[in-house]
Amino acid sequence: MSIAATHIAQVAVPVRNLDRARTFYRDKLGLPHLFDAPPGLAFFGCGETRLMLSQPEGPETATSAILYYGVPDAGAAEAELRAGGVAIEQPAHKIATVNGKQVWLAFMRDSEGNMIGLMSEQAAG
């Protein structure tokens, strides 16, 4: 069984101070700032991969980055993995429409307990 992930579409990086992190990634690393989204998210371009800075809303803090694997259809990939016995943390759901494309995400944990995401972009209809 294989869902045929095609590339790393996005990396989520947890931050403690979104304004400070946005300035660092934009001004020090020179990454193009794409857009901000509530609550507490800033997105940057880095070649074919999008970087998402994420500030937690509450006292919880993430301690590691999350890789988002690009797939043709997050819902179909989630269904295939679920059928293969993978425990799904969050089923595929639309999170936004950006530049005329719907962004869909699904989340699960790998064999070592790391959170991973599946991400697809589909034309908005």
Image: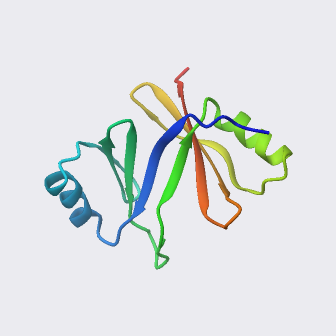
Residue at the bottom extreme? 59
Q: Residue 35, percent across and down?
A: 30, 43
| Residue plotted at (43% across, 24% down) | 100
Q: Residue 25, percent across and down?
A: 23, 55
Q: Residue 74, percent across and down?
A: 64, 37
Asked if 90 appears above or below 104 in the picture, the reply is below
**Is 81 on the left-hand or right-hand side of 55?**
right
Asked if 23 appears above or below 96 in the picture, the reply is below
| Residue plotted at (51% across, 53% down) | 67
Asked if 15 appears above or below 39 in the picture, the reply is below
**Is 83 on the left-hand or right-hand side of 65?**
right
**Is 49 on the left-hand or right-hand side of 68?**
left
Q: Determine which quarter of the picture holds residue 56.
A: bottom left
Q: How is the image coloured?
A: rainbow
Q: Determine which quarter of the picture holds residue 113.
A: bottom right
**Quarter of the picture holding the N terminus:** top right
| Residue plotted at (51% across, 37% down) | 7
Q: Residue 87, percent across and down?
A: 77, 57
**Quarter of the picture holding the C terminus:** top right
Q: How many marks?
A: 0
Asked if 22 appears above or below 74 in the picture, the reply is below
| Residue plotted at (35% across, 67% down) | 15
